[in-house]
Image: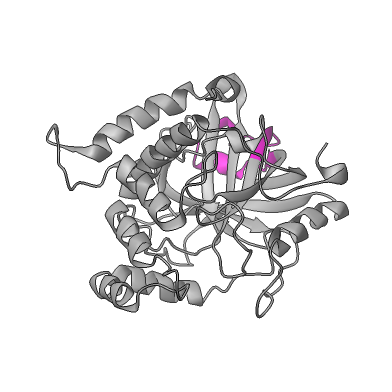
Amino acid sequence: MRRRSALLGIGAVACVGAVDVGAFAYVSGRATPDRLTPGRLADGFETVFGKHPGFRRNHAKGVSVAGEFVASGAGTAVSEATVFEDGRRTPVTGRFSLSGGVPDVADATKTVRGLALRFDLPDGEQWRTAMVNLPVFQDRTPQGFYDRMLAFKALPDTGQPDPEKKAAFLAEHPETVRAMELAKKHPPTSGFADSTFNGLNAFHFTNSSGGSVPVRWSMVPLQPVRAAAKGPIGRNELFETLIDAFDGGPLRWRLVLTIGGPEDPLDDATLPWPDSRRTLDAGVLTLTSVHTEASGNARDINFDPTVLPRGIAVSDDPLLSARSSVYARSFARRTGEPDTKGTVKVTGKHDD
């Protein structure tokens, strides 16, 4: 058994998780047997992907990265968070990953890619965010996510979902069908380094004058963008290409804040906001190093998206409390299991 929380300064996360687990699991003060709870959702990942002790229940395959964020000052127009102060340099610890709960899954260009970040602000504040390379999320509610995960579970004999279960789910969830169609219009790029990563959920930003606006954010690559390879790729090709990219120097992304309008949905991550919405270039994320996941780096961080600094607050999106609760449950399970090192090995000068 292990204890990582002392390493992480995780007390705030534990408090948030405890509150959200209660809200997620109970109705009118009474637990209901068929209600989706954080435990059931975490069990769902294990049902679909198997049990892999010591690894995350989702986005199990990944590498750790580190760098800094340098603010442009533009973000102060909408948020009083210190991370946006002009010229401020904020240390960042992060993680690139692939969706799914199998730690040694083969890379594929169509697999959803993740970028999770922890910004370490002054006075112990943190901003944690977990983003993906999709334009919108595929589910509106936690129940929809859970049901889709089970309906799309690959059958052992074909490696594909049961066609009847998949069709039945999609017939009941037109919002997921629309989200999938939108994703097809935004094909994946060649790898992690040239991917745009989107926060997807809406948050409330409040500036120093007390003005509040809804915001979604994206990390837009400053590396040249290339189309993904056609056909199968090497088992670890996406990660190996990422690691090799650091040989050429740091990798950079612009943090773009999109300001929502009065009619834009704040509680439905399957719906995009119009391209005409006002945006702010809030600064540049620079990642300078990449490491095998191990004790003391991003392996040990719970990237709970509700851990936020002053000036950023959660919206009513039901996915946010669910993500917080399930991340906490996954974190509690894996930190009670044997220590692991990541399945993607970073060697040589990168893994100092």
The residue nearer to you, when weighing 339 against 167, is 339
* Left or right: where 125 falls relative to 151: right
Residue appearing at x 49%, y 64% in the figure: 135
Residue 60, visible in the rendered structure: yes
The residue nearer to you, when weighing 147 against 17, is 147
111 to 315, vertically: above or below: below
Residue 271: x %, y % from top left: 37, 64
Residue appearing at x 87%, y 45% in the figure: 348
Residue 121 falls inside the magenta stretch: no
Residue 21: x %, y % from top left: 31, 34
The image quarter containing residue 296 is top right
The residue nearer to you, when weighing 283 against 103, is 103
Q: Residue furthest front?
A: 157
Residue appearing at x 69%, y 69% in the figure: 190
244 to 211, vertically: above or below: below
144 to 155, vertically: above or below: above
The image quarter containing residue 28 is top left
* Left or right: where 155 falls relative to 225: left
* Left or right: where 48 falls relative to 235: left
